[in-house]
Image (cartoon, rainbow, N blue to C red):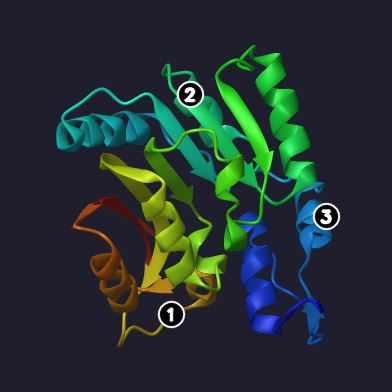
Amino acid sequence: KLPRLYTRLELKAIRGLHFDLMLKTDIIWPVLKDDWDKIFSENREFSPLNEIFLGKLLSRIGETAGKEFKTVIDLGAGTGDSAIKFANRGLLVQGLDWSETALTKATEAIKKLGLEERISLTQMDLENIDQEQIIYKPADILFSKLTYAFIKNRDKLLDNIKSLMSPESAFVLMTPTTYKGVNYGKNDKSEIAVDWDDTLKLLNAKFAKIEVFHHGYFGERGDLVTFITTK
């Protein structure tokens, strides 16, 4: 099967998510696992999950779930920042990522902190989640930070996520969003965002309850939105 070719705009978005790099070429080329491995091998700094924000997020999830939560699936774990922060709060985490390089770096960080018993890492393409490799079914929290915009079949992804949830589970989606009628500049990262109206429509079609938990404004018009959904 031939890889899907990505346009210059899509490729610029993928690079822009991690390091604010803008492509200087109009060549169209496929983005494969090896390309993601190359991105993660650059040793760039990634946007960390804010500890104060995480505390407030977990407190809110606890209020809505009405029970103690213990397990997390990190969808797009990267080099392990979010997984480590969940584990440091006593949670059991399975981190999923397509990049072998990212998972190698995450493994090193996890071993250094002695968190091997709390964090499991699995190489997996989020476009095709293999349910047989999922450890926590259902998971209490499914967490996606800055990955949703790069998923082509979001309908399928949300169906897979929903199947891994119980009625008390929470799906946390953190993604930049854009709004119709707004003229965006390059610092607003509109290339790596999803449309607000389209996102709400799809989430409402899949989940029983949608809460807009937080707006994280950046640049002049950027908006990193955190949604909490329940099954």
How packed mark 2 is, by other alpha carbons closer than 10 Å (few <14, some 14-19, many 20 or more), is: many
Pick whichever, 54 or 131, lies toward us.
131
Pick whichever, 49 or 67, lies toward us.
67
| Residue in the image at 15% along x and 30% along y | 66
| Residue in the image at 31% along x and 85% along y | 180
Give coordinates of residue 33: x percent, y percent: 78, 59
Give coordinates of residue 85: x percent, y percent: 49, 27
How packed mark 1 is, by other alpha carbons closer than 10 Å (few <14, some 14-19, many 20 or more), is: some
Q: Which residue is mark 2?
A: 92
Position of 220 with respect to 215 (left or right) is right
Q: Which mark identifies residue 207? A: none
Give coordinates of residue 186: x percent, y percent: 54, 75
Q: Which residue is mark 3?
A: 38
Dot 1 falls on a residue whose secondary structure is loop
Pick out the residue farthest to the front: 132
Position of 92 with respect to 226 (left or right) is right
Displayed quadrant of residue 116: top right
Q: Amino acid at mark 3?
A: Lys
Pick whichever, 15 or 174, lies toward us.
174
Displayed quadrant of residue 71: top left
Q: CA distance from mark 2 to mark 1?
A: 39 Å
Q: Amino acid at mark 2?
A: Leu
Dot 3 falls on a residue whose secondary structure is helix
Q: Amino acid at mark 1?
A: Tyr
Dot 2 falls on a residue whose secondary structure is strand
Pick out the residue farthest to the top: 114
| Residue in the image at 69% along x and 24% along y | 109
N-terminal label among 3 and 1? 3
Q: Which residue is mark 1?
A: 184
Give coordinates of residue 51: x percent, y percent: 41, 29
Q: CA distance from mark 3 to mark 2?
A: 29 Å
| Residue in the image at 16% along x and 32% along y | 63
